[in-house]
Amino acid sequence: MHHFLDVILSAVIYLSSPDSKAVQTTMPLADTNDVPQVELAFAVPEHTNDLTTLRNKLSTENFQCSEIVKLTGANAFTVSRKDFDRARKAAVKIIQENSLSARLELDTGNNGYELWENGKKAGEKYF
């Protein structure tokens, strides 16, 4: 059985809210390359502040990060599709140097993620 991300191509639609947080909804697309922003990281439930730290540190390295709340309620953020590989490398370095916990997408196609716990890679999950 396919993971729903394998079946449904999605776009992030940002809706402004009073506290400047964003909401994510999904819609079918013809091609994932049409999506200018792609998800880079999402929170480990017990370490949601680590995701904020990671996003802020990437922002100071001139990566434009957009916070989203997934339909599942998980906090996440996106980066530009063209910056994904560089941002991912920078994120791994930041996670290791700061002993952060987060889940990083393996690629722009949402084919899986790496789980990082306290700065150490704890596993991978593929869809």
Image: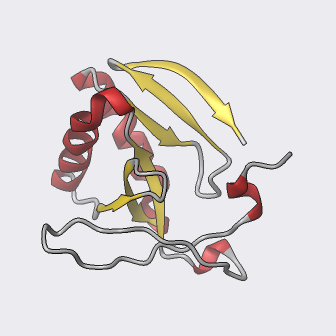
| Residue for point 19% across, 40% down | 53
Color scheme of the displayed model: secondary structure
Please determine whether, in this image, residue 9 is positioned above or below residue 84: below
| Residue for point 13% across, 74% down | 18
Please determine whether, in this image, residue 54 is positioned above or below residue 95: below
| Residue for point 62% across, 53% down | 110
Q: Picture coordinates of residue 127 (x, y %)?
A: 72, 42
Q: Picture coordinates of residue 122 (x, y %)?
A: 51, 17
Q: Picture coordinates of residue 8 (x, y %)?
A: 71, 66
- Residue 113 lies in quadrant: top right
- Image quarter hosting the N terminus: top right
Q: Is residue 117 left or right of residue 94?
A: right
Q: Is residue 21 left or right of residue 106?
A: left
- Residue 109 lies in quadrant: bottom right
| Residue for point 81% across, 49% down | 2
Work out which residue is located at the far right of the displayed protein and give it. Answer: 1
Please determine whether, in this image, residue 29 is positioned above or below residue 77: below
Count of marks overlaid on the render? 0
Q: Nearer the viewer, residue 7 or 120?
A: 7
